[in-house]
Amino acid sequence: MKICVLGGFGVIGRAIVESLLTQTDVHVVAADRHPGSPEEVFGEHAARVTAMTVDVDRPASLAAPLADCRLAVSCIGPFYRHGVAVARAILENGCHGIDLCNDAVASSGILALDAVARTRGLTYLTGMGASPGLSNLFALRAAAGMDRCASVHIHLVALLDGQAGRAQMDHLMSLSTEDVPVFRNRTHTRVRPFSEPEHENFPHPIGRQRVRQMGHPEVFTLPDYLDVEEVWVKGALLPSWVERILWATSTAGVARDEVPRMRVADGLYKLYHLGFSRKHRKNLALRVKVTGWKKGTPLSVSVSAVDSLARLSSLPVTVAAVELMEGGIQTPGVYPPEGCLREDHALLHLARLGLVFHQEERYLL
């Protein structure tokens, strides 16, 4: 069986390929704009990897790497620019699909391809990384057992280091250019980016950090599967000067148009890598807090994890890929993670793959 990983030689794409190679017996087609040598990148598993060149700006070029593949994984960012076109190409080439889409608008566009997937008898999971993805599963886990849920608050901290790529910088720039979606009082609305600051405690070594509003797709998808009154995503970027630059460019209006936004993102990438090439083993912290009632008593349940962005993204993709390959997901259509995965089964599988997460419960008396 073949699986195509689009963007397979990037930091996260490489982690996904390695996870699939070690956890399954599939052959992986790693497609990238600048593919490397499988022998140098994937070592002992190189015989099960085929490297191919692809140009995401020409969707027709995706046909070759997708040929003869049953499943395709897209980690080509930024998703606000490429997400919908790549998802459509995957479905039109007859493949099941998984992506890491972390852009709220692009996520809505991908979900709108549901009729295309159903017509072709295919299943596509969008937002199957850390946030969204793991955060959605944590929300379901925290809400399990509650009689009624009131809110889902997702907090994340990203420590930008030598592993940060241009697409990640571009995504961060896009977050600062327009108002952030939130679900509040059972209504979708928008607030200013980086607004409503608060402090949140994260696992070691991240610790206590100040987080602000940051739009991610969970705001749109979780209310469809959990009866809640409020959902929002707040995050922080470390070092803090990166966030200050994003805020300054947003306030000045520099990043409203795509061309200057790309130039600033590229400049920020070069500036950052000029003096910060260190790689951190744990550069992403995620904490999901659900409040509600259990047997009439107010309750708060939090689920958290801290690890590398690559691992927190690649492990959920691996679990979803195994579910699709083994027939655990058979309903055609386009879904967010909470739409077709059982969170207890998925989190058990993730734990077996080495993911460590913590759950805390506190009665609000």
Image (tube, rainbow, N blue to C red):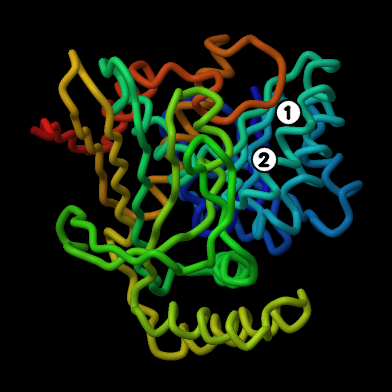
- Identify the amino acid type marked 2: Val
Up/down of 263 relative to 192, above or below: below
Residue indicated by mark 1: 69
Where residue 63 appears, x then y in whole percent?
86, 40
Number of the label disc, if any, that sits on residue 337 = none
Q: Quadrant of residue 171?
A: bottom right
Up/down of 211 relative to 363, above or below: below
Where residue 348 appears, x then y in whole percent?
30, 21
Q: Residues within 10 Å of mark 2 (few under 14, many from 20)?
A: many
Q: How many marks?
A: 2
SS for callout 2 = strand
**Could you tell me which residue is drawn at 24 percent across and 66 percent down?**
209
Q: Is residue 332 or residue 249 the one in the foreground?
A: 249
Describe residue 250's horizontal placement relative to residue 353 as left or right. Answer: right
Q: Quadrant of residue 9?
A: bottom right
Labels 1 and 2 touching (C-beta < 8 A): yes
Up/down of 241 relative to 48, above or below: below
For the C terminus, the quadrant is top left
Where residue 276 appears, x then y in whole percent?
38, 83
Q: Is residue 93 or residue 88 the one in the foreground?
A: 88
Residue that sits furthest to the left in the current view: 365
Disc with the residue nearer the chain's start (1 vs 2): 2
- Identify the amino acid type marked 1: Cys
Describe residue 35's horizontal placement relative to residue 44 as left or right. Answer: right
**Could you tell me which residue is drawn at 54 percent across and 18 percent down?**
340
Residue indicated by mark 2: 29
For the N terminus, the quadrant is top right
**Could you tell me which residue is drawn at 58 percent across and 83 percent down?**
251
Compute the Cα span from label 1 to label 2: 8 Å
